[in-house]
Image (cartoon, rainbow, N blue to C red):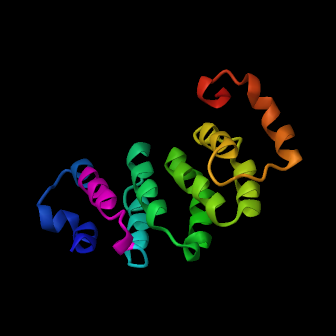
């Protein structure tokens, strides 16, 4: 039922305001972050929501990707990797960049290092280097991170 509501939110709710529909859909996405949604069409629906309206606020995009990564499976890696490289999503892709480390640490390092020049996700990437399942820290990572130790943005430095 939730999947149907996610797919046809405007029709089911009668809400005309695009922003209100997106906020409602965000709630549906988070309601779907449970074990029974794994392997359903929930992740593809959440991902398609990223591209339904290009004027979405980055926090709404991040809500979609945060929910999607919570129920994603390793088979979602290729699609998530594409999303991680899509700069049009801005910091909405931060949860996906972090999720990549759960599946393929080596490839995730390559992707994340390549995206460090994007200030919208830089702090999230640096955080993922320090935390989570990224327990292998290659020596080359120190040289990559070193320039950000004196970054003017506090969130990047911490």
Where are the magenta residues, as a range? 22-37
Tell me where residue 32 sits by quadrant: bottom left
* Residue in the image at 38% along x and 48% along y: 60
Vertical arrangement, residue 142 with respect to residue 23, above or below? above
Q: Give coordinates of residue 12: x percent, y percent.
A: 14, 67
* Residue in the image at 22% along x and 69% along y: 5
Q: Give coordinates of residue 120: x percent, y percent.
A: 58, 39
Is 101 part of what is drawn in magenta? Answer: no
* Residue in the image at 56% along x and 61% along y: 83
User: With 103 as the anchor, is 9 left or right in this view?
Assistant: left
Q: Give coordinates of residue 122: x percent, y percent.
A: 64, 39
Tell me where residue 124 sits by quadrant: top right
Vertical arrangement, residue 58 with respect to residue 12, above or below? above
Q: Quadrant of the N terminus?
A: bottom left
The residue positioned farthest toward the left in the image shown: 14
Q: Is residue 86 visible?
A: no
Dominant secondary structure, magenta: helix
Vertical arrangement, residue 141 with respect to residue 99, above or below? above
Is 26 part of what is drawn in magenta? Answer: yes
User: With 67 as the anchor, is 2 left or right in this view?
Assistant: left
User: With 33 as the anchor, is 111 left or right in this view?
Assistant: right
* Residue in the image at 62% along x and 72% along y: 78
Q: How many marks?
A: 0
Q: Give coordinates of residue 49: x percent, y percent.
A: 38, 62
Q: Quadrant of the C terminus?
A: top right
Closer to the camera in the image, 32 or 92: 32
Q: Is residue 62 visible?
A: yes
């Amino acid at each position: 039922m939730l999947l149907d509501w996610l797919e046809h939110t405007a029709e089911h709710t009668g809400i005309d305001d695009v922003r209100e529909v997106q906020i409602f859909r965000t709630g549906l996405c988070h309601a779907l972050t449970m074990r029974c949604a794994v392997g359903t069409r929930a992740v593809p629906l959440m991902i398609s929501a990223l591209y339904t309206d290009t004027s979405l606020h980055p926090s709404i995009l991040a809500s979609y990707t945060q929910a999607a990564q919570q129920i994603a499976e390793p088979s979602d890696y290729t699609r998530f990797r594409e999303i991680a490289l899509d700069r049009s999503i801005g910091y909405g892709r931060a949860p996906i960049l972090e999720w990549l480390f759960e599946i393929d640490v080596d490839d995730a390092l390559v992707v994340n290092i390549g995206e460090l020049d994007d200030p919208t996700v830089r702090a999230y990437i640096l955080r993922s280097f320090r935390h989570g399942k990224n327990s292998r820290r290659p020596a080359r990572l120190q040289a990559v991170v070193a320039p950000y130790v004196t970054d003017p943005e506090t969130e990047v430095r911490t």
